Image (spheres, coloured by chain):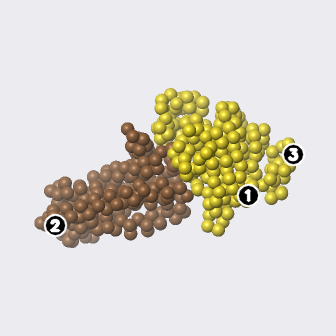
Amino acid sequence: MSSFLRVAWVVVKKDLTVEVRSLEILSTTMFFAVTVVLMFSFGLVVDGRPLNDVAAAILWVAIAFSGTLALGRTFERERQHDTLRALLLAPADRPALYVGKLVGILLLLGLVELVLVPLVGLLFNAPVIAQALPLAGLVILGTLGFASVGTLFAAMLVRARSRDVLLPIMLYPMTVPVMIAGVRGTAALFQPTPDPAVAQFWLALLAAFDVVFVTLALWTFEPVMTE
Amino acid sequence: MPFDRLAVVDVARHYGRRKALSQISFTCEPGEIVGLLGPNGAGKSTLLNILATLLAPSKGRVEYGDRTSDQGGPAVRAQIGMLGHDLFLYPELTAHENLTFFAHLYGLANVPVIVDSALERANLSTRANDYVGGFSRGMRQRVALERALLHDPRLILLDEPFTGLDQASTRALVARLQERRSAGRMIVLATHDLDVVDGVLTRALFLINGKQSADTSAASSLRERYQAAVAGA
Protein backbone atom coordinates (compact mmCIF):
# COMPACT_ATOMS: atom_id res chain seq x y z
CA MET A 1 0.00 0.00 0.00
CA SER A 2 1.40 3.41 -0.86
CA SER A 3 2.32 5.72 1.97
CA PHE A 4 -0.51 8.11 1.07
CA LEU A 5 -3.21 5.43 1.24
CA ARG A 6 -1.67 3.89 4.37
CA VAL A 7 -1.84 7.20 6.25
CA ALA A 8 -5.40 7.90 5.04
CA TRP A 9 -6.49 4.41 6.09
CA VAL A 10 -4.84 4.70 9.52
CA VAL A 11 -6.69 7.99 10.15
CA VAL A 12 -10.03 6.53 8.97
CA LYS A 13 -9.58 3.47 11.17
CA LYS A 14 -8.72 5.59 14.20
CA ASP A 15 -11.71 7.91 13.65
CA LEU A 16 -14.09 4.97 13.26
CA THR A 17 -12.73 3.24 16.37
CA VAL A 18 -13.18 6.40 18.43
CA GLU A 19 -16.70 6.90 17.03
CA VAL A 20 -17.78 3.28 17.59
CA ARG A 21 -16.70 3.64 21.24
CA SER A 22 -18.45 6.94 21.88
CA LEU A 23 -21.21 7.05 19.20
CA GLU A 24 -21.19 10.74 20.01
CA ILE A 25 -21.20 12.19 16.51
CA LEU A 26 -23.38 9.52 14.91
CA SER A 27 -26.10 9.77 17.56
CA THR A 28 -26.25 13.58 17.60
CA THR A 29 -26.11 13.86 13.81
CA MET A 30 -28.73 11.15 13.30
CA PHE A 31 -31.03 12.61 15.94
CA PHE A 32 -30.70 16.07 14.45
CA ALA A 33 -31.33 14.92 10.85
CA VAL A 34 -34.39 12.85 11.81
CA THR A 35 -35.80 15.74 13.86
CA VAL A 36 -35.41 18.16 10.94
CA VAL A 37 -37.27 15.82 8.57
CA LEU A 38 -40.02 15.11 11.10
CA MET A 39 -40.58 18.80 11.88
CA PHE A 40 -40.86 19.72 8.21
CA SER A 41 -43.17 16.79 7.51
CA PHE A 42 -45.61 18.08 10.13
CA GLY A 43 -45.73 21.49 8.48
CA LEU A 44 -45.37 20.73 4.80
CA VAL A 45 -47.41 17.56 4.25
CA VAL A 46 -51.13 18.25 4.10
CA ASP A 47 -53.59 15.33 3.81
CA GLY A 48 -50.72 13.01 2.96
CA ARG A 49 -49.59 15.19 0.05
CA PRO A 50 -46.40 17.23 0.27
CA LEU A 51 -45.91 20.56 -1.48
CA ASN A 52 -44.11 20.41 -4.84
CA ASP A 53 -40.38 19.65 -4.63
CA VAL A 54 -40.40 20.01 -0.87
CA ALA A 55 -39.10 16.48 -0.25
CA ALA A 56 -35.93 17.18 -2.23
CA ALA A 57 -35.32 20.44 -0.41
CA ILE A 58 -35.89 18.89 3.03
CA LEU A 59 -33.55 16.01 2.24
CA TRP A 60 -30.71 18.37 1.33
CA VAL A 61 -31.38 20.75 4.21
CA ALA A 62 -31.10 17.78 6.57
CA ILE A 63 -27.88 16.59 4.88
CA ALA A 64 -26.32 20.09 5.02
CA PHE A 65 -27.25 20.80 8.65
CA SER A 66 -26.35 17.39 10.01
CA GLY A 67 -23.15 17.43 7.92
CA THR A 68 -22.14 20.75 9.48
CA LEU A 69 -22.76 19.29 12.92
CA ALA A 70 -20.64 16.22 12.13
CA LEU A 71 -17.80 18.32 10.69
CA GLY A 72 -17.66 20.57 13.73
CA ARG A 73 -17.70 17.69 16.22
CA THR A 74 -15.10 15.65 14.32
CA PHE A 75 -12.55 18.43 14.50
CA GLU A 76 -13.57 19.49 17.99
CA ARG A 77 -12.45 16.03 19.06
CA GLU A 78 -9.02 16.65 17.50
CA ARG A 79 -8.85 20.09 19.13
CA GLN A 80 -9.73 19.02 22.67
CA HIS A 81 -6.53 17.09 23.24
CA ASP A 82 -4.53 18.95 20.61
CA THR A 83 -4.19 15.75 18.60
CA LEU A 84 -4.49 17.65 15.33
CA ARG A 85 -1.01 19.03 16.03
CA ALA A 86 0.26 15.49 16.51
CA LEU A 87 -1.25 14.50 13.15
CA LEU A 88 0.34 17.51 11.44
CA LEU A 89 3.69 16.73 13.04
CA ALA A 90 3.77 13.24 11.54
CA PRO A 91 6.05 12.80 8.52
CA ALA A 92 3.04 12.00 6.39
CA ASP A 93 1.70 13.77 3.34
CA ARG A 94 -0.73 16.25 4.84
CA PRO A 95 -3.25 15.73 2.01
CA ALA A 96 -3.38 12.08 3.15
CA LEU A 97 -4.52 13.28 6.58
CA TYR A 98 -7.19 15.33 4.83
CA VAL A 99 -8.37 12.33 2.82
CA GLY A 100 -8.50 10.22 6.00
CA LYS A 101 -10.64 12.78 7.81
CA LEU A 102 -12.84 13.24 4.71
CA VAL A 103 -13.49 9.51 4.30
CA GLY A 104 -14.35 9.22 8.01
CA ILE A 105 -16.91 12.01 7.69
CA LEU A 106 -18.33 10.53 4.47
CA LEU A 107 -18.84 7.14 6.15
CA LEU A 108 -20.56 8.80 9.07
CA LEU A 109 -22.84 10.87 6.85
CA GLY A 110 -23.49 7.79 4.72
CA LEU A 111 -24.89 6.02 7.77
CA VAL A 112 -27.08 9.01 8.57
CA GLU A 113 -28.32 9.13 4.97
CA LEU A 114 -29.22 5.43 5.08
CA VAL A 115 -31.87 6.41 7.63
CA LEU A 116 -32.62 9.86 6.27
CA VAL A 117 -33.48 8.94 2.67
CA PRO A 118 -36.04 6.20 3.50
CA LEU A 119 -37.54 8.51 6.13
CA VAL A 120 -38.01 11.27 3.55
CA GLY A 121 -39.53 8.70 1.19
CA LEU A 122 -41.94 7.55 3.88
CA LEU A 123 -43.03 10.94 5.22
CA PHE A 124 -43.14 12.79 1.89
CA ASN A 125 -44.34 9.96 -0.38
CA ALA A 126 -41.17 10.27 -2.44
CA PRO A 127 -40.27 7.41 -4.83
CA VAL A 128 -36.93 6.67 -3.16
CA ILE A 129 -37.04 2.95 -3.95
CA ALA A 130 -38.11 3.32 -7.58
CA GLN A 131 -35.36 5.92 -8.13
CA ALA A 132 -32.83 4.29 -5.82
CA LEU A 133 -29.88 4.21 -8.20
CA PRO A 134 -29.86 7.79 -9.56
CA LEU A 135 -30.85 9.07 -6.12
CA ALA A 136 -27.92 7.23 -4.55
CA GLY A 137 -25.64 8.83 -7.15
CA LEU A 138 -26.92 12.32 -6.34
CA VAL A 139 -26.67 11.81 -2.58
CA ILE A 140 -23.16 10.30 -2.75
CA LEU A 141 -21.76 12.97 -5.08
CA GLY A 142 -23.56 15.80 -3.25
CA THR A 143 -22.29 14.62 0.13
CA LEU A 144 -18.77 14.31 -1.26
CA GLY A 145 -18.87 17.89 -2.59
CA PHE A 146 -20.25 19.25 0.67
CA ALA A 147 -17.88 17.27 2.90
CA SER A 148 -14.77 17.97 0.81
CA VAL A 149 -15.13 21.72 1.34
CA GLY A 150 -16.41 21.25 4.89
CA THR A 151 -13.45 19.10 5.96
CA LEU A 152 -10.99 21.71 4.71
CA PHE A 153 -12.80 24.60 6.43
CA ALA A 154 -13.38 22.69 9.67
CA ALA A 155 -9.66 21.84 9.83
CA MET A 156 -8.71 25.43 9.07
CA LEU A 157 -11.00 26.80 11.76
CA VAL A 158 -10.09 24.31 14.47
CA ARG A 159 -8.01 26.89 16.34
CA ALA A 160 -10.36 29.82 15.76
CA ARG A 161 -12.27 30.93 18.83
CA SER A 162 -15.57 31.44 16.98
CA ARG A 163 -15.22 28.30 14.82
CA ASP A 164 -18.83 27.17 15.42
CA VAL A 165 -20.11 30.42 13.93
CA LEU A 166 -17.52 30.72 11.19
CA LEU A 167 -17.91 27.19 9.79
CA PRO A 168 -21.48 27.60 8.44
CA ILE A 169 -20.74 31.19 7.37
CA MET A 170 -17.85 30.00 5.21
CA LEU A 171 -19.24 26.62 4.21
CA TYR A 172 -22.76 27.36 3.01
CA PRO A 173 -21.94 30.05 0.40
CA MET A 174 -19.18 27.85 -1.03
CA THR A 175 -21.40 24.78 -1.26
CA VAL A 176 -24.47 26.51 -2.72
CA PRO A 177 -23.75 25.04 -6.19
CA VAL A 178 -23.65 21.53 -4.68
CA MET A 179 -26.88 22.11 -2.79
CA ILE A 180 -28.67 23.53 -5.85
CA ALA A 181 -27.52 20.61 -8.00
CA GLY A 182 -28.57 18.15 -5.31
CA VAL A 183 -32.01 19.69 -4.80
CA ARG A 184 -32.80 20.12 -8.51
CA GLY A 185 -31.55 16.64 -9.41
CA THR A 186 -33.51 15.04 -6.56
CA ALA A 187 -36.62 17.09 -7.38
CA ALA A 188 -36.45 15.80 -10.97
CA LEU A 189 -36.53 12.23 -9.61
CA PHE A 190 -39.32 12.89 -7.10
CA GLN A 191 -41.77 14.37 -9.65
CA PRO A 192 -44.97 12.39 -10.39
CA THR A 193 -43.33 11.64 -13.75
CA PRO A 194 -39.61 11.42 -12.98
CA ASP A 195 -37.26 13.13 -15.41
CA PRO A 196 -34.05 11.05 -15.53
CA ALA A 197 -32.42 13.28 -18.16
CA VAL A 198 -32.59 16.32 -15.89
CA ALA A 199 -31.32 14.27 -12.94
CA GLN A 200 -28.48 13.04 -15.15
CA PHE A 201 -27.54 16.62 -15.98
CA TRP A 202 -27.35 17.63 -12.31
CA LEU A 203 -25.49 14.42 -11.51
CA ALA A 204 -22.83 15.29 -14.09
CA LEU A 205 -22.61 18.80 -12.70
CA LEU A 206 -22.15 17.41 -9.18
CA ALA A 207 -19.35 15.19 -10.42
CA ALA A 208 -17.64 18.24 -11.95
CA PHE A 209 -18.03 20.22 -8.68
CA ASP A 210 -16.57 17.30 -6.75
CA VAL A 211 -13.50 17.12 -8.96
CA VAL A 212 -12.91 20.86 -8.52
CA PHE A 213 -13.57 20.92 -4.76
CA VAL A 214 -11.53 17.83 -3.91
CA THR A 215 -8.61 18.98 -6.07
CA LEU A 216 -8.62 22.45 -4.51
CA ALA A 217 -8.87 21.03 -1.00
CA LEU A 218 -5.96 18.60 -1.56
CA TRP A 219 -3.89 21.41 -3.02
CA THR A 220 -4.56 23.93 -0.24
CA PHE A 221 -4.64 21.67 2.84
CA GLU A 222 -0.87 21.73 3.45
CA PRO A 223 -0.40 25.53 3.29
CA VAL A 224 -3.54 26.37 5.26
CA MET A 225 -2.59 24.01 8.06
CA THR A 226 0.82 25.65 8.55
CA GLU A 227 0.15 28.83 10.47
CA MET B 1 19.47 11.90 6.09
CA PRO B 2 19.51 12.51 9.87
CA PHE B 3 20.40 16.06 10.85
CA ASP B 4 23.05 16.63 13.51
CA ARG B 5 22.52 20.27 14.38
CA LEU B 6 19.64 22.62 15.08
CA ALA B 7 20.24 26.31 14.41
CA VAL B 8 17.71 29.03 15.13
CA VAL B 9 18.75 32.14 13.23
CA ASP B 10 17.22 35.50 14.09
CA VAL B 11 13.71 34.09 14.39
CA ALA B 12 10.74 36.37 14.97
CA ARG B 13 7.05 35.62 15.05
CA HIS B 14 4.32 38.26 14.94
CA TYR B 15 0.56 37.86 15.36
CA GLY B 16 -0.70 40.95 13.59
CA ARG B 17 1.04 43.81 15.41
CA ARG B 18 1.80 41.75 18.51
CA LYS B 19 5.34 40.45 18.63
CA ALA B 20 5.37 37.00 20.21
CA LEU B 21 9.06 36.45 19.51
CA SER B 22 11.87 38.61 18.20
CA GLN B 23 15.52 38.07 17.34
CA ILE B 24 15.89 34.59 18.76
CA SER B 25 19.12 32.81 17.87
CA PHE B 26 20.66 29.70 19.35
CA THR B 27 21.95 26.29 18.39
CA CYS B 28 21.50 22.82 19.78
CA GLU B 29 24.05 20.08 19.21
CA PRO B 30 23.71 16.31 19.71
CA GLY B 31 23.82 15.40 23.39
CA GLU B 32 22.55 18.79 24.54
CA ILE B 33 19.48 19.65 26.57
CA VAL B 34 18.56 23.29 26.01
CA GLY B 35 16.02 24.78 28.39
CA LEU B 36 13.65 27.54 27.35
CA LEU B 37 12.91 29.39 30.55
CA GLY B 38 10.65 32.34 31.07
CA PRO B 39 7.41 33.53 32.61
CA ASN B 40 3.98 32.80 31.13
CA GLY B 41 3.50 34.45 27.74
CA ALA B 42 7.23 34.77 27.13
CA GLY B 43 6.97 32.92 23.81
CA LYS B 44 8.31 29.50 24.85
CA SER B 45 5.46 27.48 23.33
CA THR B 46 5.50 29.62 20.19
CA LEU B 47 9.20 28.90 19.77
CA LEU B 48 8.66 25.16 20.31
CA ASN B 49 5.90 25.18 17.67
CA ILE B 50 8.26 26.91 15.25
CA LEU B 51 10.95 24.31 15.95
CA ALA B 52 8.33 21.58 15.39
CA THR B 53 7.55 23.13 11.95
CA LEU B 54 3.93 23.66 13.03
CA LEU B 55 4.34 27.41 12.90
CA ALA B 56 6.25 29.39 10.30
CA PRO B 57 8.51 32.17 11.58
CA SER B 58 7.58 35.67 10.42
CA LYS B 59 11.30 36.41 10.07
CA GLY B 60 14.52 34.42 10.29
CA ARG B 61 14.90 30.69 9.79
CA VAL B 62 15.36 27.39 11.56
CA GLU B 63 18.00 25.06 10.14
CA TYR B 64 17.84 21.32 10.68
CA GLY B 65 21.33 20.30 9.60
CA ASP B 66 21.61 21.78 6.11
CA ARG B 67 17.89 22.10 5.50
CA THR B 68 15.16 24.48 6.62
CA SER B 69 11.67 23.20 7.45
CA ASP B 70 10.42 24.39 4.03
CA GLN B 71 13.11 22.36 2.30
CA GLY B 72 12.76 19.30 4.54
CA GLY B 73 9.00 18.80 4.90
CA PRO B 74 8.11 15.24 5.95
CA ALA B 75 11.80 14.22 6.02
CA VAL B 76 12.50 16.82 8.74
CA ARG B 77 9.28 16.07 10.63
CA ALA B 78 10.27 12.38 10.72
CA GLN B 79 13.19 13.36 12.96
CA ILE B 80 11.24 15.52 15.40
CA GLY B 81 9.38 14.22 18.42
CA MET B 82 7.19 16.57 20.41
CA LEU B 83 5.52 16.28 23.77
CA GLY B 84 2.97 19.06 23.97
CA HIS B 85 1.32 20.46 27.05
CA ASP B 86 -1.93 18.74 25.97
CA LEU B 87 -0.17 15.37 25.47
CA PHE B 88 -1.57 14.57 21.97
CA LEU B 89 -3.39 11.37 23.02
CA TYR B 90 -6.88 10.08 22.25
CA PRO B 91 -8.68 9.36 25.55
CA GLU B 92 -11.14 7.01 23.79
CA LEU B 93 -8.27 4.72 22.73
CA THR B 94 -6.20 2.43 24.93
CA ALA B 95 -2.52 3.10 25.56
CA HIS B 96 -1.67 0.29 23.13
CA GLU B 97 -4.04 1.65 20.45
CA ASN B 98 -2.70 5.20 20.82
CA LEU B 99 0.89 4.07 20.36
CA THR B 100 -0.04 1.70 17.52
CA PHE B 101 -1.89 4.49 15.72
CA PHE B 102 1.07 6.85 15.88
CA ALA B 103 3.54 4.10 14.97
CA HIS B 104 1.54 3.38 11.79
CA LEU B 105 1.18 7.10 11.09
CA TYR B 106 4.98 7.41 11.23
CA GLY B 107 5.31 4.41 8.91
CA LEU B 108 7.44 2.44 11.38
CA ALA B 109 8.34 -1.20 10.78
CA ASN B 110 7.77 -3.89 13.47
CA VAL B 111 4.98 -1.88 15.08
CA PRO B 112 3.94 -4.53 17.68
CA VAL B 113 7.53 -4.86 18.95
CA ILE B 114 8.07 -1.10 19.08
CA VAL B 115 4.76 -0.51 20.87
CA ASP B 116 5.38 -3.28 23.41
CA SER B 117 8.81 -1.94 24.30
CA ALA B 118 7.43 1.62 24.53
CA LEU B 119 4.77 0.41 26.96
CA GLU B 120 7.42 -1.41 28.94
CA ARG B 121 9.56 1.72 29.16
CA ALA B 122 6.52 3.67 30.30
CA ASN B 123 6.01 0.97 32.93
CA LEU B 124 2.47 0.48 31.64
CA SER B 125 2.56 -3.01 30.11
CA THR B 126 -0.13 -4.20 32.51
CA ARG B 127 -2.37 -1.25 31.65
CA ALA B 128 -1.79 -1.46 27.88
CA ASN B 129 -5.44 -2.23 27.13
CA ASP B 130 -6.92 0.43 29.41
CA TYR B 131 -8.35 3.61 27.97
CA VAL B 132 -6.01 6.56 28.26
CA GLY B 133 -8.98 8.68 29.40
CA GLY B 134 -8.97 6.71 32.66
CA PHE B 135 -5.26 7.26 33.37
CA SER B 136 -3.79 9.66 35.91
CA ARG B 137 -1.88 12.69 34.60
CA GLY B 138 1.44 10.97 35.32
CA MET B 139 0.47 7.81 33.43
CA ARG B 140 -0.79 9.81 30.46
CA GLN B 141 2.43 11.82 30.51
CA ARG B 142 4.46 8.60 30.34
CA VAL B 143 2.44 7.29 27.39
CA ALA B 144 2.71 10.68 25.69
CA LEU B 145 6.49 10.77 26.14
CA GLU B 146 6.86 7.32 24.64
CA ARG B 147 4.54 8.37 21.79
CA ALA B 148 6.85 11.29 21.08
CA LEU B 149 9.90 9.00 21.15
CA LEU B 150 8.43 6.05 19.20
CA HIS B 151 10.33 6.88 16.03
CA ASP B 152 13.62 7.66 17.84
CA PRO B 153 13.67 11.34 16.81
CA ARG B 154 16.91 13.31 16.55
CA LEU B 155 15.24 16.42 17.99
CA ILE B 156 13.00 16.10 21.04
CA LEU B 157 10.77 19.05 21.96
CA LEU B 158 9.02 19.13 25.30
CA ASP B 159 6.51 21.73 26.48
CA GLU B 160 6.17 21.86 30.27
CA PRO B 161 6.88 18.13 30.62
CA PHE B 162 6.94 18.14 34.44
CA THR B 163 3.51 19.69 35.00
CA GLY B 164 1.35 17.58 37.29
CA LEU B 165 3.96 14.88 37.87
CA ASP B 166 4.77 13.45 41.28
CA GLN B 167 8.38 13.08 42.39
CA ALA B 168 8.77 9.51 41.17
CA SER B 169 7.37 10.35 37.71
CA THR B 170 9.57 13.46 37.54
CA ARG B 171 12.66 11.40 38.37
CA ALA B 172 11.68 8.82 35.73
CA LEU B 173 11.19 11.54 33.12
CA VAL B 174 14.55 13.15 33.93
CA ALA B 175 16.24 9.74 33.67
CA ARG B 176 14.62 9.10 30.30
CA LEU B 177 15.74 12.49 28.99
CA GLN B 178 19.29 11.90 30.18
CA GLU B 179 19.28 8.51 28.49
CA ARG B 180 18.20 10.20 25.22
CA ARG B 181 20.90 12.83 25.67
CA SER B 182 23.50 10.09 26.11
CA ALA B 183 22.23 8.57 22.88
CA GLY B 184 23.19 11.82 21.13
CA ARG B 185 19.74 13.28 20.72
CA MET B 186 19.06 17.02 20.82
CA ILE B 187 16.51 18.08 23.42
CA VAL B 188 14.80 21.45 23.76
CA LEU B 189 12.39 21.83 26.65
CA ALA B 190 10.26 24.67 27.94
CA THR B 191 9.60 24.62 31.65
CA HIS B 192 8.86 26.58 34.79
CA ASP B 193 10.23 23.85 37.04
CA LEU B 194 13.63 25.41 37.55
CA ASP B 195 14.58 23.26 40.53
CA VAL B 196 13.84 20.07 38.60
CA VAL B 197 15.92 20.96 35.56
CA ASP B 198 18.78 22.59 37.46
CA GLY B 199 21.75 20.37 36.69
CA VAL B 200 19.91 18.60 33.86
CA LEU B 201 20.18 21.36 31.26
CA THR B 202 23.38 21.83 29.34
CA ARG B 203 22.26 25.34 28.43
CA ALA B 204 19.47 27.70 29.42
CA LEU B 205 17.82 30.27 27.19
CA PHE B 206 15.91 32.94 29.08
CA LEU B 207 12.92 34.32 27.22
CA ILE B 208 11.32 37.48 28.55
CA ASN B 209 8.45 39.10 26.61
CA GLY B 210 9.43 37.24 23.46
CA LYS B 211 13.06 38.36 23.61
CA GLN B 212 16.17 36.46 24.50
CA SER B 213 17.65 37.72 27.74
CA ALA B 214 21.39 37.42 28.38
CA ASP B 215 22.55 34.82 30.90
CA THR B 216 25.09 37.07 32.63
CA SER B 217 24.76 36.00 36.23
CA ALA B 218 27.67 34.17 37.76
CA ALA B 219 25.33 32.44 40.23
CA SER B 220 25.50 28.69 40.29
CA SER B 221 21.80 28.02 40.79
CA LEU B 222 19.49 28.15 37.80
CA ARG B 223 16.82 29.94 39.82
CA GLU B 224 19.21 32.79 40.69
CA ARG B 225 20.36 33.08 37.08
CA TYR B 226 16.73 33.15 35.96
CA GLN B 227 15.87 35.87 38.48
CA ALA B 228 18.85 37.90 37.35
CA ALA B 229 17.78 37.54 33.70
CA VAL B 230 14.21 38.61 34.50
CA ALA B 231 15.48 41.58 36.52
CA GLY B 232 17.87 42.60 33.75
CA ALA B 233 15.27 42.43 30.98
- The chain that hosts pointer 3 is B
Residue bearing mark 2: A191
Question: How many residues crowd mark 1 within 10 Å: few (<14), some (14–19), many (20+)?
Answer: some
Q: Which mark is residue B219?
A: 3
Q: Residue at x 81, y 45 (%)?
A: B222
Q: Estimate the spatial distance between the alpha carbons at disc 2 and disc 3, rounded to whole Å.
A: 86 Å
Residue B1 in the image: x percent, y percent?
56, 38
Q: Residue at x 49, y 57 (%)?
A: A223
**Quadrant location of residue A141?**
bottom left
Q: Which mark is residue A168?
A: none
- The chain that hosts pointer 2 is A
Q: Which mark is residue B211?
A: 1
- Which callout, 2 or 3, points to the residue nearer the camera? 3
* Chain B palette colour: yellow
Helix, strand or loop at mark 1: strand
Q: Are marks 1 and 2 on the same chain?
A: no
Quadrant of the image for the C terminus of chain A? bottom right
- Which callout, 1 or 2, points to the residue nearer the camera? 1
Residue A122 in the image: x percent, y percent?
21, 59
Q: Are marks 2 and 3 on the same chain?
A: no
